Amino acid sequence: MKKYLMILLAFFILSACKTSQDMAMKSADKGFILKVANEKFESKKWADALVLYERLSNLVAGTDDAPNVVYNSAYANYYDKNYKLAGHQFKNFAVTFPQDPRAEDASYMSALCYYEGSMDYNLDQTNTELAINELQNFLNNYPNSEKSKNINDLIEELTYKLEFKSFENAKQYYKMADYKAANVSFENVLNDFPSTKLRPAIYEYILKSRYELAVNSIYDLKKDRIESAIAFAKQVESEMPNTDKAKEATDLRNKLMKEKADFSEVEKKVEIRKKEFADQQKLEAQKSIEKKQAEDEIKADQTKRDSAALSTPLPAATFNIKK
């Protein structure tokens, strides 16, 4: 009997709840709708509360109830994981009601919503960039706020996500053996994020990329690329002494020095061949000039003979007379 009464009581409670929601949805009484909406909010029934707050948006516009409706709607969306909409509502609250004591909290929550909406590093990072901007704006607007204590940690976490995405993109070029593009991409990561924690790994990939470019380079670019790789190896050794990265840089630098010595021998042979080729061309050019001069002299002599022949009169005609 007791069990039956408990079930019956639960049924009536659920029916009453459902009835109040239905009544509020059909009602035009602002006060009643607001009362039910706040009850749903307090009982953490976010979807029900949001439906009613949406109905109230026009009814409370310009009244003292408007801030509460906007503020509670933002939190209901936040708890319901509608971070993009919640962020917009919190920001709208902070801008629309700057004198409200909750404006600081709304500004913080707006930034936090963008943070929560940040995607994994391998996905679109638009929300991550927006979150960093919003968090930095909060720091600028409320530098002494208690809520500012963890802001820098959140910014650092989001910034690392952007760093790692750029780092992974650069790695793809290296994996495809496009060492020139890899080198440029890794350097861009360092330029964009000078304080990155990924610097040791980035240095390793730049060093390997420059090494591969140097040893597999075409003749005209090889010398400069060897020098570039050696210079970077020395930089790694200087900036990271007594580390595995420095040891690896030293090993590659030694290989590059041998490559440089071998290439110097090749350069000498090439220069000898170039000189031989230049001398041969010069000799052939001289022969061509001499041949042309000889041909010109022959033509000139022929022209003189032809001219002399034309200027000599023909001998007088003679006739035999019969006797």
Image: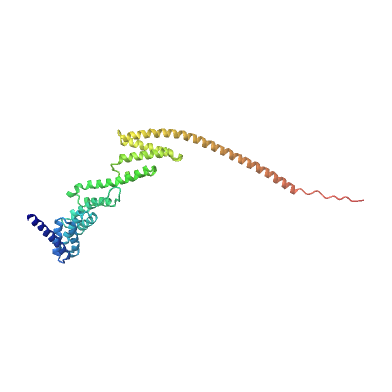
Dividing the picture into quarters, in which one does residue 285 lie? top right
Hey, which residue is sitting farthest right in the picture? 323
Image coordinates of residue 249 in percent, x first then y, are 35, 35
176 and 155: which is toward the camera: 176
Hey, which residue is sitting farthest left in the picture? 2
Image coordinates of residue 8 in percent, x first then y, are 10, 58
Whether 153 is drawn above or below 22: the answer is: above
Asked whether residue 295 is in view, the answer is: yes
Question: Residue at the location (23% across, 47% down)?
Answer: 154
Dividing the picture into quarters, in which one does residue 85 lie? bottom left
Image coordinates of residue 9 in percent, x first then y, are 9, 58
Q: Is residue 316 found left or right of 51 in the rendered image?
A: right
174 and 284: which is toward the camera: 174
Image coordinates of residue 35 in percent, x first then y, are 13, 61
267 and 203: which is toward the camera: 203
Q: Is residue 1 found left or right of 51 in the rendered image?
A: left
Asked whether residue 97 is in view, the answer is: no
